[in-house]
Structure formats: structure tokens, C-alpha cells
Amino acid sequence: MKTVRTVNGVSRIDDAAPGSQKLNDFLRTILIAHRDTLVKRVIDNLDRYIDYRFNLKPTKDQTDKLRNSLANLKGGGIVPAKHASLFMEINVKDHVYVGTKTFYEEIDQEIEWVLK
């Protein structure tokens, strides 16, 4: 059994052989839920987050565009190439902690793209 700890708690993956498609599918589902939680937190406090991270005060139009863009990111899939180290780590270790750094970088890139 493998365990994966995220902002959503601990998830257990049973009966999945290392390197198997089943294991990767479970991990992809866990990572999507993890990112969705982080995106929801950003959307809920969008003005404050942008002020903190980018030292900007977005206009109403920018805020609306950002909410839509982040909502699309929230519903999107995970690109395994961006998270290859996590996929490799779960294949090697039985217990993995999924940090937030790469996910917040992805969120910040989306925000920067809209604010340009």
C-alpha cells in the first residue's frame, strides 16, 4: 500500500504495482484534487492573493478574467511531465508528501498570463 499526503489529507493506493497505469491514474486523480483545492483557495481570496504575490490591485475586468482562467485550470488535467518527480517518487517510496510549490507556480503563471 502507498500513501500520498496532500492538502486534502492522506490518500491510500492499494493493489497498484509500481510503474503501473493504475498507480499513475490514482496519483493523477490525487494531484488534480490537490491542485483544485489550492486553486479554490486562491479564487476565494483572489484580490488579496494578487496584492500579496504581485503587489497589484486588479481591475474588475481583470478579476473576472482571472476567475474564469483559474476555474478552467481547476477543471483541467495534470501534465505528467510537470510532475515527473512526484510520479517517480511514488513508484519508489511507500509514503509521499505532495508540496504546494509547483502548483502555486502553475497558478502564478496563469495569473501572470492574464494580467499581461
Image (cartoon, helix red, strand yellow):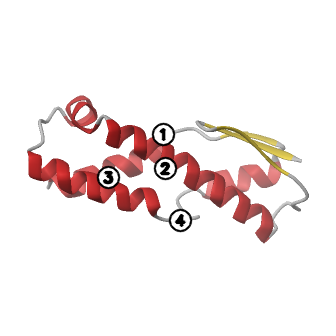
Q: Left or right? Give the position of 7 relative to 52.
A: right
Distance (Cα) linking label 4 and label 1: 16 Å
* Mark earlier in primary sequence (2, 4): 2
Q: Which residue occupies 36% across, 56% down?
A: 71
Instruction: Give the answer, above or below, for where 70 lies relative to 17.
Output: above
Q: What mark, if any, has residue 101 been given in the picture? A: 1
Report crowding for label 1: few under 14, some 14 to 19, many 20 or more residues within 10 A (C-alpha). few
Instruction: Give the answer, above or below, for where 108 lies relative to 18.
Output: above
- 60 or 82: nearer the eye? 60
Mark 4 touches mark 1? (CB < 8 Å): no
Amino acid type at image mark 2: Asp
* Mark earlier in primary sequence (1, 2): 2
Report crowding for label 2: few under 14, some 14 to 19, many 20 or more residues within 10 A (C-alpha). many
Amino acid type at image mark 3: Gln
| Coordinates of residue 24 in the picture (x, y in percent) | 72, 63
Helix, strand or loop at label 4? It is loop
Amino acid type at image mark 4: Val
Q: Quadrant of residue 7?
A: top right
Q: Nearer the viewer, mark 2 or mark 4?
A: 2
Q: Left or right? Give the position of 68 relative to 82.
A: left
Q: Quadrant of residue 32?
A: bottom right
Mark 3 touches mark 2? (CB < 8 Å): no
Q: Left or right? Give the position of 59 relative to 20.
A: left
Report crowding for label 3: few under 14, some 14 to 19, many 20 or more residues within 10 A (C-alpha). few
* Mark earlier in primary sequence (3, 2): 2
Q: Which residue occupies 72% across, 55% down?
A: 88
Label 4: which residue? Answer: 79
Q: Nearer the viewer, mark 3 or mark 2?
A: 2
Distance (Cα) linking label 1 and label 3: 12 Å
Amino acid type at image mark 1: Lys
* Mark earlier in primary sequence (1, 3): 1
Q: Left or right? Give the position of 51 relative to 40.
A: left
